[in-house]
Amino acid sequence: MSPLILLAVLIGVLGLAVGSFLNVLIYRVPRNESVVSPPSHCPRCDSEILNRHNVPVLGWLVLRGRCHSCALPISARYPLIEAATGVAFAALTFAVGLSLALPVVLFLAAVAITKSMIAYDTRQAA
């Protein structure tokens, strides 16, 4: 396996974790909530997400898209944002390669994803 492919896979996995945090930002920032406390929780029943279920994309799949406590659906948007961030990070790694610009590009991509989703969620009728 070429070093660039391996790097892209590793950065893509990092992107999954970053995407999980972006979900926190997207949900909490418009509501003026803390992004560090309380821990991740079901938006419906408020039960805390268990660590074993808080794995990007896989946790949602294991739970079949439902809260482990109340069994109500959890939006597919959460794993989609995680996956999209992972794919974006991997693709940008291929495009930029291992350089000093890579962290900057990845940061800007994360900001763009976050701002886009917050803008989508908070759009107002004209």
Image: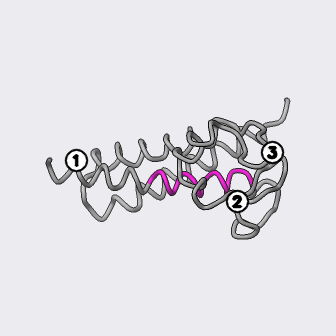
SS label for mark 2: loop
Question: How far from the left and from the top, in percent, is residue 95?
Answer: 29, 45
What amino acid is at disc 3? Answer: Cys
Q: Nearer the viewer, residue 49 or 40?
A: 49
Q: Is residue 63 above or below residue 35?
A: above
Magenta range: 15-27
Q: How far is the residue under mark 1 from the one under mark 3?
A: 41 Å
Q: Earlier in the sequence, mark 1 or mark 2?
A: 1
The residue sitting at 41% across, 42% down in the picture is 87
Q: Is residue 76 magenta?
A: no
Q: Is residue 18 magenta?
A: yes
Q: Earlier in the sequence, mark 1 or mark 3?
A: 1
Q: Which mark is residue 119?
A: none
Q: How far is the residue under mark 3 from the one under mark 2?
A: 15 Å
Are discs 3 and 2 less than 8 Å apart at CB?
no
Read off the residue under disc 2: 40
Q: Is residue 46 left or right of residue 22?
A: right
Question: How far from the left and from the top, in percent, is residue 53?
Answer: 60, 53
Q: How far is the residue under mark 1 from the one under mark 2?
A: 32 Å
Depth check, mark 1 against mark 3: the one in front is 3
What amino acid is at disc 1? Answer: Ile
Q: Nearer the viewer, residue 124 or 49?
A: 49
Mostly what secondary structure, the magenta segment?
helix
Q: Is residue 22 left or right of residue 101?
A: right
Read off the residue under disc 3: 70
Q: Earlier in the sequence, mark 3 or mark 2?
A: 2
Depth check, mark 3 against mark 2: the one in front is 3
The residue sitting at 57% across, 48% down in the picture is 59
Question: How far from the left and from the top, in percent, is residue 55?
Answer: 54, 54
Read off the residue under disc 1: 5
SS label for mark 1: helix
Q: Is residue 77 left or right of residue 19?
A: right
